[in-house]
Image (cartoon, coloured by chain):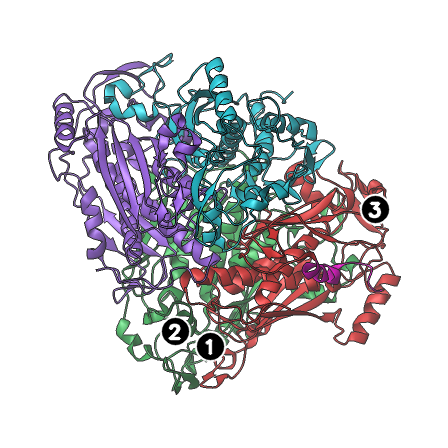
Chain colours: A red, B green, C purple, D cyan
């Protein structure tokens, strides 16, 4: 199951230390302007090595379009986007070949498949998300034509909520060979009402699926989120007036359908599992071992998940957008403007 | 999109005040013992009118098997389960015909479809979940053969965590025509390792999709959940020894794949939106109105969502279980025992 | 796999001698007028006992709408259509319990599932097609709004091509306890250009899938069909002029996409396998037996497949129609007229 | 819709004159030996320029594995196979830019998408089938472990049925700038009973879908095919004895389920539409034109469709094979031998 979406179907492929990673987008509407330079900025936001808060690994993450575009426009045929792997230091991982890293998918892969690519997490590496970000970029450019905008922000890291506090706690973690968790907020503005299906295809359910499908995410909240548990009905309900809603506890989605208000989502990201601190583990034979993970790891993976979460939100929305066209042939027919 | 699952495909149908609600299960393995009396107990747990904490509406929710069973065993063909609607007081809803209820899907349905069945929420009614519970019961009986067990509990209501405190706060809400939110915990024991797919079909992502797809759920947490945001990597990682894991912050799922530990999920449910308290709203023409919802509503919908959440978890697990058979033909071949 | 279609998704259920057969339609556009009396005429065309060319079994095949309709219009929610089984003479099949009938699916069901409902073919009975015809009727009514019309005709039976010859050969077969094969033609008029996807979702491929999915169909031809094998390129190509195409060897589909010409399909149906003539077979233990199938069987099943083939064509077209709305938001937006 | 299959999901991408064509295979079982040199022979069979019966275009069609393989074995993760386009003479197509070629998908693409890549057919080019052949090769290697073998043969060209006659008629067509149609037979040996689903997922329906999804195919027949129309029931039924079936009119499939006999399929392929003979057509503005297609075209496209049809059959069978594992956990558990 490496495909996301029913209408704008995104299939990613590639291991972190294989020849390339990439994505095939099937169902992108035709006649839409698109070039490599439109997509590259989305990847650049996710790319490592940009500042001292993230891993210093150098990955150029240069996107290449293999199909589906002709004369600068989408053809309506599958768009294949490829990113060659260039910064692969497989030897770094030799010592991890027979060890299961705590907090990682290593052991799960062996239990599931009976085989795994141990180099850098293989398919479970965060690197796979570059392909999602590329596809999400295409979706975001499509949605921008209709003035639908998605913005992600790092809200909190280990309790700190200011930029200064966040940076300080991340640098401290890095210096100690440790890592820290965090909370990301995603806000969608300009979303039309009517997106999402009322039963199993609820828009909030699809968002939860998309966000929890990012490695390291442990909680997804919509609108009021966990604070709904301590509210009464009259506090939680968003009252309506002819001028609009008086609050947004719903987070822009009621009964699984977008209301036209801002969509508000929060996701909690666990601390990066790769730490230098010595931990107990077992090897592939089941014997007792200890492990101290060396190498170039992100001290706070939440930082780099922000553009991934934006991408996943774009993928959810474009899929629901195209779905709604089937139901209502008059739905937002014309792009309000071409993306710049 | 009224179908859930890829292998054990569940399609529900029916409006709360139509002739019937029901479900078609496609992909249930053949040769499995199943009768109406096996499924009925699951529905009885969800049925209203059982005590003074829930709505006093009387619904018999009697299940009828229309197809897919012969001589007491599943045929491998689609199983249609039907529940006739018997306690329909459509007239109760006449005054709501032209009003949008705050916190409800009423307005969303109009925006999406241009038409709605206003009687009792129609398709968005909690009543639709009876069909899910029926299908989930079939799944749970299948899983029980392999000693996989799912148990849901109401953990918290408006901050109260003891049975006494919970009951008191619910009765108070009911007496004031108000409602309260809550938190439900779901625990799965006996889940084998290897369930779930590593990228978009992550087991935790499918659980988040399933749980957020229940009306009123505003947050889904796996394992450590939102507390992961304030932890360090070495605190959060579940260290391994030859005797097992030393903790379960992962909640039984790493990299999207079950580890064999208990699966731990928490969901936050908003307070029931139907309250007597007067609230501002608009009518279908957009004019300013007030509303006070009368009638037989649950003061804490979380109480009745417990069996629904168990059902959705069963549906996620059976789907992942059957998926794993394709990958690994030796996967848990024999039921360990027949369900009692 | 009991679901057909991606956008207008049709799931049938039910065994021939169970309580009922039926269908759930998910994805029917909202706001469309629909009642039981609109659908019943489609079923009446398939219903047995109408003249002496078909089985004299009496089945009322009365359709009941359980969901998805409110005030005479579709809600956009799942439509469940039910047909109760009333003419079940299960005892007729007792002697067939342990015998495999030649030309039937009996043995395949046992090999596949390890269990079967032997009464009247169970799920493999032609009776299941009543559910398809009901769903196809809904699709046909939708398409008729856009002046898309589907007409099936029995073209040939055992070489006879006139109504008189056809009837005579069928009556002779019936009198001898035998059966005969035939060829059905399906013509679609008013189909807009642009339906169908160019690679795996070719319109002709979907038609072939739909038609070969009717029990007893052994061949599907589009346009020139098998005669294409003896033609040259310049003979086969349909030349274009400003006034239209000069021929229709393509059968209305080129490169998997409808051209706007009439869609022309032919299907070959095998003779009904249930015959009185004594034949060799084996029992469920593998022992040598002979069989002479008694009872009320159609001497030419092709006669009754005509409305089923029309239904399947309607299902293919509505699905492609809704798919095209996603690609092109301006596609045939308004129904040209409401169905009468 | 560029994906084929539910369990072994194959997504192709690429235009004939773009940078590359390729395929992503999702759902390939893990632990299976696979290398580029295993797959290349399948492509070599389809490759043009091999003898004087086919187009003299030179395409190396060299396969490259981008993902999903580690240490010579499948990982269970998506396998991306890439073929770079090297023999692209786009200029050849400049004069066709504003002309619709009779018998081609050119006009359909414009009607569907409002845009097309006119160079060499773009996505509708036969070149796309190279990607299917690559994926089909992987499937065939998997199936060969279980001694399931698929063999395609060119049975007939313009009425000729001997190798000599076939070659002569093809050379004559080529010399005259014309083309000829033909009939291909596909035989599957070693197929276990029980594959295929009884209603919409019938094995013969899936085969018809797969075969009619190859460009140029106008008819698909199973077993007796169109001759079933002139047979009686007792002639057509395949009688059973303890030693096996006495005939195979069913073509190895009854009621949609494989019987264990050989699967027999025939497909009729139309003559290649690109001919030098002058034909009437219109340009993209709708004006009257004539056309004589020059260039390196196959005089009988049926010749080159043989390996494509084998590939599509392999894809149908592996998908049904994996599906059956879900139903029956004991189904053919062990490969009988590793592919050589």
State the predominant SS element of the stretch in magenta.
Answer: helix
Q: Quadrant of residue D48?
A: top right
Marked residue chain, label 1: B
Marked residue chain, label 2: B
Q: Quadrant of residue C269?
A: top left
Residue A280, how many percent across, how many down? 80, 48
Residue A72, how many percent across, how many down? 63, 57
**In this orientation, does residue B28 appear?**
no
Q: Which residue is mark 2?
A: B297
Callout 2: few (<14), some (14-19), or many (20+) C-alpha neighbours within 10 Å? many
Which residues make up the magenta segment?
A37-51
SS category of the residue bearing label 3 = strand
Q: Residue furthest right?
A: A175
Marked residue chain, label 3: A
Q: State yes or no: discs 2 and 1 in contact (Cβ < 8 Å).
A: yes
- Seen from the viewer's position, the closer of residues A50 and B237 is A50
Q: Which residue is mark 1?
A: B179
Rounded to the nearest whole Å, what is the CA distance between mark 2 and mark 1? 9 Å
Q: How many marks?
A: 3
Residue B309, how many percent across, how many down? 49, 59
Q: Residue furthest top?
A: D243
């Amino acid at each position: 199951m490496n495909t996301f979406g029913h209408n704008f179907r995104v299939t990613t492929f590639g291991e972190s230390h294989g020849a390339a990673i990439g994505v095939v987008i099937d169902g992108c509407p035709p006649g839409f302007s698109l070039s490599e330079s439109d997509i590259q900025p989305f990847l650049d936001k996710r790319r490592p090595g940009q500042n001292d808060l993230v891993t210093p690994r150098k990955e150029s993450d240069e996107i290449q379009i293999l199909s589906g575009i002709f004369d600068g426009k989408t053809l309506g045929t599958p768009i294949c986007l490829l990113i060659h792997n260039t910064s692969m230091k497989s030897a770094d991982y030799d010592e991890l070949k027979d060890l299961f890293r705590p907090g990682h998918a290593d052991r799960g892969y062996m239990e599931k498949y009976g085989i795994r690519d141990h180099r850098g997490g293989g398919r479970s590496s965060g690197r796979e998300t570059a392909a999602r970000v590329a596809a999400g970029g295409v979706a975001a450019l499509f949605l921008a034509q209709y003035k639908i905008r998605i913005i992600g922000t790092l809200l909190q890291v280990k309790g700190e909520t200011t930029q200064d506090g966040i940076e300080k706690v991340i640098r401290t973690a890095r210096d100690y060979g440790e890592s820290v968790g965090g909370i990301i907020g995603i806000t969608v503005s300009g979303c039309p009402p009517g997106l999402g299906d009322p039963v199993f295809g609820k828009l909030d359910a699809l968002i939860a699926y998309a966000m929890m499908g990012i490695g390291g995410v442990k909680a997804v909240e919509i609108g009021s989120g966990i604070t709904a548990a301590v509210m009464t009905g009259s506090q939680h309900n968003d009252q309506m007036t002819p001028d609009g809603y008086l609050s947004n506890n719903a987070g822009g989605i009621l009964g699984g359908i977008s209301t036209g208000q801002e969509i508000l989502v929060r996701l909690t990201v666990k601390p990066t599992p790769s730490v230098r601190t010595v931990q107990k583990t077992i090897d592939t034979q089941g014997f007792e071992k200890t492990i101290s993970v060396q190498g170039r790891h992100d001290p706070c993976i939440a930082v780099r998940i922000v553009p991934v979460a934006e991408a996943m939100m774009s993928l959810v929305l474009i899929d629901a957008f195209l779905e709604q066209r089937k139901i209502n042939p008059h739905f937002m027919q014309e792009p309000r403007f071409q993306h710049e």
